[in-house]
């Protein structure tokens, strides 16, 4: 546990990364067992969950998540600008545009953001987690050109990782030895930031815009609510007879062996097309 400059008790960066990786890895295991997405999509979706586990600390000006986030944004958008106007300007002009976008976002936007942001403010809220999830779906769907179901699955991973971060900070605000709650308790995990209504309104507006720009979540919702998927996961929860083919299980601990009528896991439906596919394929 480390206090920040305001004396707020919180989990450190290493703890957030470690716990976020464990939770995201556990979710990835379920996703792989359910066969809902193609294997090549599993790694970026899992990384979205790990990123979510450190993202709330973006409002700490000197934190590693903040520096890494703005460095990544600067690289991404500077090259996006470069490739967009590559055929319209000279090499010298392209260099200036690329460098201007890189420096402007990394240092200019970084400075502006931290001039407006307050630590343990709106970024430590469920509302910000929902915005981050929708923004992740926008990036996966519209920028990385992934299937809508994959885009919202990545958003779901991001949201879970985000909540794990908030929960950890609240846990570290409980002093078990002295049996007391520290003054920072209640500032990390909250629905909205009632202390800063304008920031809350701005985040709500950003969430609405992100949801509007994101691909339809219908495929993701349908897949997540599928009885076939959950029944199949239940069948695969425990080994049928032996652990790793070595240790035989007592009948009371063994999973139920599937029969011909058993329900198995299945992939998220493919994107809508004019002609129906013969069988669903992992997006």
Image (cartoon, rainbow, N blue to C red):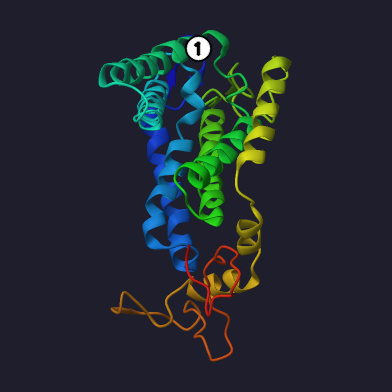
Q: Residue at x 45, y 67 (%)?
A: 33
- Expressed as whole percent of the image width and height from the top left, the position of residue 212 reads 67, 39
Count every numbered label the image shows and give the total: 1
List the residue tagged with mark 1. Answer: 114
Q: Residue at x 42, y 34 (%)?
A: 16
In which quadrant is the N terminus drawn? top left
Confirm whether residue 7 shows in the render.
Answer: no
Between residues 175 and 150, which one lies in front from this camera angle?
150
Q: Residue at x 58, y 80 (%)?
A: 263
- Expressed as whole percent of the image width and height from the top left, the position of residue 14 reads 35, 31
Which image quadrant for residue 96?
Answer: top left
Q: Residue at x 35, y 30 (%)?
A: 87
- Expressed as whole percent of the image width and height from the top left, the position of residue 165 reads 51, 34
- Expressed as whole percent of the image width and height from the top left, the position of residue 22 reads 41, 47
Mark 1, other Cα within 10 Å: few <14 / some 14–19 / many ≥20: some
Confirm whether residue 254 shows in the render.
Answer: yes
On screen, 30 above or below 181?
below
Between residues 192 and 68, which one lies in front from this camera angle?
68
Where disc 1 sits, the SS reads: helix
């Amino acid at each position: 546990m480390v206090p920040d400059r305001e004396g707020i008790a919180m989990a450190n960066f290493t703890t957030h990364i470690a716990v976020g990786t464990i939770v995201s890895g556990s979710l990835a295991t379920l996703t792989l067992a359910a066969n809902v997405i193609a294997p090549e999509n599993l790694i970026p979706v899992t990384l979205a969950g790990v990123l979510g586990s450190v993202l709330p600390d973006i409002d700490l000006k000197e934190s590693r998540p903040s520096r890494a986030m703005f460095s990544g944004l600067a690289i991404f958008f500077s090259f996006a600008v470069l490739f967009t106007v590559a055929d319209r300007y000279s090499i010298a002009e392209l260099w200036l545009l690329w460098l201007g976008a890189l420096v402007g976002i990394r240092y200019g936007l970084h400075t502006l953001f931290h001039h407006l942001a307050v630590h343990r403010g709106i970024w430590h809220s469920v509302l910000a987690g929902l915005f981050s999830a929708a923004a992740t779906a926008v990036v996966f769907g519209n920028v990385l050109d992934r299937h809508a179901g994959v885009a919202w699955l990545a958003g779901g991973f991001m949201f879970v990782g985000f909540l794990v971060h908030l929960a950890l900070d609240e846990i570290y605000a409980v002093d078990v030895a002295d049996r007391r709650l520290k003054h920072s308790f209640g500032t990390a995990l909250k629905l909205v930031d009632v202390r800063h209504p304008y920031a809350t309104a701005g985040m709500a507006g950003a969430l609405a815009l992100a949801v509007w720009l994101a691909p339809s979540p219908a495929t993701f919702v349908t897949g997540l609510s599928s009885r076939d998927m959950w029944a199949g996961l239940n069948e695969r929860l425990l080994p049928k007879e032996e652990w790793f083919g070595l240790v035989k299980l007592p009948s009371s601990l063994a999973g139920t062996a599937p029969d011909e009528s058993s329900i198995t896991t299945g992939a998220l439906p493919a994107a809508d097309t004019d002609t129906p596919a013969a069988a669903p394929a992992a997006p």
